[in-house]
Image (cartoon, rainbow, N blue to C red):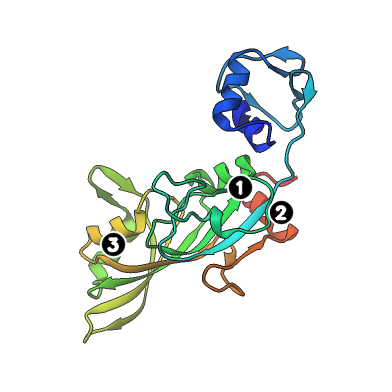
Amino acid sequence: MERLQKVLAHAGVASRRQAEKLITSGHVRVNATVVTELGTKVGVHDKITVDNVPVVGEAPVYVMLYKPRGVVSTANDDKGRKTVVDLIENVPQRIYPVGRLDYETTGLLLLTNDGELANRLTHPKYEVDKVYVARVTGVPTNDAMRQLRKGVTVDGETYAPAKLKLLSSDAKKHTAIVQVTIHEGKNHEVRKMLAAVGYPVEKLKREQYGFLTLKGLQNGDSRYLKPEEVKELKRLTGLAE
């Protein structure tokens, strides 16, 4: 289910704000009934009209991006910075990032106009793994790794247990490469968790999302997901047909 104003915006009827005005002023009907309440949710089988003209939904689109550093994970940025949507060419539909990677973090990011799938992929209930590789200052001790595997609380925010693997270390440079697997998607989660146990992140990359990897993509590249990949994502999140 999606909010009505979002469906209208996705269908190209109007911007989100203009769609809200159309709704509150009585121009929109759902299943022949005038709807004026913002936040009303509709599904794929609901019939929507604006001034008696049927609204045709956009075809669902699923894109994987190898996000570079220095790009924001939003569709629009009020500071004028380059966004991940700016990097996706020749996609007429309005697509949005599934969750976020922060400004300095690189790696695998999904973008779609399928709000239901996006919501499920980002909801911790479905426990879709996100695999990161971090270069940290210092070499994590076994005790620090155990803390993260049990879950930590930072500034009152509790983070679920993570899977940790020390990939390599460099005693001379006083750094280490750590693989971190989480299924939540809280803001700056991996950075905060590692800093909390004394190993601040110097560089961070998301290498895997569920079963998807960056194989075949270079930094800044993107591609459409294959039908079987979309089907598997839906299976993972309970949306399989």
Which residue corresponds to mark 2? 231
* Crowd band around label 2 with a 10 angstrom C-alpha radius: few (<14), some (14–19), many (20+): some
Instruction: Check whether the beta carbons of the residues at disc 1 and disc 2 lie within 8 A of each other.
Output: no
Q: Earlier in the sequence, mark 3 or mark 1?
A: 1
Q: Point out which mark residue 136 bears.
A: none
Check disc 3 and report its element: helix, strand or loop: helix
Residue 27 visible in the current orientation: yes
Q: Which of 231 and 49 lies nearest the eye of the viewer?
A: 49
Distance from the alpha carbon under mark 1 to that under mark 2:
19 Å
Direction from residue 53 to residue 216 in the image, left or right: left
Q: Secondary structure at mark 2?
A: helix
Residue of label 3: 194
| Residue 82 in the image: above or below residue 32 | below
Q: Is residue 1 visible?
A: no
| Amino acid on which the number 3 mark rests in the picture | Leu
Residue at left 74%, top 18%? 51
**Badge 1: few (under 14), some or many (20 or more) residues near its Cα, within 10 Å?**
many
Instruction: Name the spot of residue 116 as percent of width and height, x first.
Output: 62, 40
Question: Of the residues under marks 1 and 2, which one precedes in the sequence?
Answer: 1
| Separation of marks 2 and 3 at Cα, in angstroms | 34 Å
